[in-house]
Amino acid sequence: MSKLQGKVAVVTGSSKGIGAAIAKQLASDGASVVVNYASDKAGAEKTVAEIVKAGGKAIAVGASVTKPEDVEKLFAETKKAYGKVDILVNNAGVYSFAPIEAFTIEEYTRIFDTNVRGLLLTTKAAVELIPAEGGSIINIGSIVSETTPAASSIYTASKGAVDAITRVLARELGARKIRVNALNPGITGTEGIQSAGISGSDFENGLVAQTPLGRLGKPQDLATVASFLASDDAGWVTGALLQAGGGLR
C-alpha cells in the first residue's frame, strides 16, 4: 500500500515549481491532492492533469492565501471534495531582494501578507478539518533564515517568522497529534528564479559554488522530503527545521 493512501493533502501555491513537484509526489504516494493557485489557473490544471494521467486524484482550487474569504473557499472546496485534511503544505510564497535603502511599506506588506499571514490563515482553516487521528503540516521556509544574505531583510525576516511559527505550533498542536515541521530549501531551479533573472547569473553561480553537493537544487529534491514529513515515517518528527539545500549554510 502507498504510504499516503487514504490521505488528503492541500498544497498551496502548487501550480508550478516546488509546489507542483510536491503535489505530484504526494499524489504518487497515494494522497488525494488539492492543487491551490492564486492566479496561474492553467499551471494548476496542468499539474492536476499530470496527477490524474499517472493514476492519482487531484482537483484545482483558485484562492489567494492573503485573503480570508479565499482561504475559507479553499477549505470549503476541500471539505466538499474529500471531507477532511490530513496534510497541509504551506508552499505559497513570494520574495524579492533589495538593500535597506530601498525598503518600502508596500513590499514589506506584500511579502509578509503571503509568507506569514497567509500561512497562519491556511493553518487555522486546515486544523478545523484535521481528524482526531492527527495530521502533518509542512511549512516551506528557506535557508535564508540561516544564511541571512545581504539585501534580503524583508524576505529573510518573513522566513525567520516561518521557522518560529513552526516551532510554536508544534508545541501547540502536538496534543492533537498534529505534527508541524519546516522544510527549508536552498536555491532551487524553478520558473521563479528564471523570471527573476537569477538563473545563470553570477549570484546563482556563487551560491552553487558554496553548496557542498555542487549543484542547483531541483523541485523533486524537495518533493521527496515533503512526502517523508507527510508520512508516518516521520511520526516522531515535529518542530523540526529541516534544511534541504545541498549543504549550503
Image (spheres, rainbow, N blue to C red):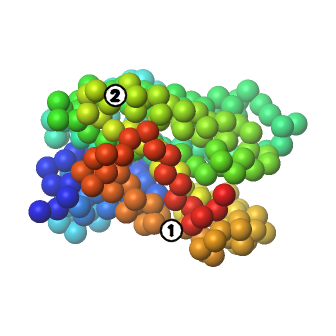
Numbered tag placed on residue 111 in the rendering: none
Q: Nearer the viewer, residue 25 or 75?
A: 25
For the residue carrying disc 2, how many other residues have a C-alpha within 10 Å: few (<14), some (14-19), or many (20+)?
some
Q: Residue furthest bottom?
A: 214
At x 66% / y 36%, what residue is drawn? 157
Question: Mark 1 = which residue?
Answer: 218
Q: Nearer the viewer, residue 92 or 206?
A: 206
Total label count? 2
Residue furthest out toward the right:
101
Q: Quadrant of the N terminus?
A: bottom left
Quadrant assignment for the C terminus: bottom right
Image coordinates of residue 148 in percent, x first then y, are: 72, 47
Say what amino acid the circle numbered 1 marks. Lys
Give the residue drawn at x 31%, y 51%.
Answer: 234
The amino acid pointed to by label 2 is Leu
- Where disc 1 sits, the SS reads loop
Residue bearing the label numbered 2: 173
